[in-house]
Amino acid sequence: MLKRRTLTLNPSKARAAYHRACALAALHADSSLSVRLARYNEAMDRARALEAQEVRHA
């Protein structure tokens, strides 16, 4: 089976969207609340950093 890659013009935007999805998934994980919150915050920090980097380059 072939994997299809999505062509994106802005890879940092795609990575930010990926980290936002990971953050939401972390909230629904089967872990303690403190672990879920820590994972969510880490993923959102990465997404925000990527978006800030994108704004600076634009």
Image (cartoon, rainbow, N blue to C red):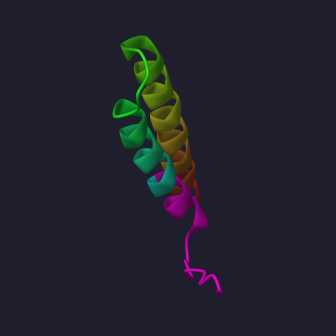
| Closer-to-camera residue (12/33) | 33
Q: Is residue 20 above or below residue 10?
A: above
Q: Quadrant of residue 15?
A: bottom right
- Which residue appears at 49% of the width and 50% of the height? 51
Q: Position of residue 16 (x, y in %)?
A: 50, 52
The percent position of residue 21, horizontal first and vertical second, equals: 41, 49
Position of residue 55 relative to residue 3, above or below, is above
User: In the rendering, at what x and y percent does residue 30 appear?
Assistant: 41, 27
- Name the quadrant containing residue 34: top left
The foreground one among 29 and 43 is 29
Per the picture, the main secondary structure of the magenta-coloured stretch is: loop
Residue 3 among those drawn in magenta: yes
Q: Quadrant of the N terminus?
A: bottom right
Q: Is residue 30 magenta?
A: no
Answer left or right for 47 relative to 2.
left
The span picked out in magenta is 1-16
Tell me the residue at 35%/31% (across/down): 27
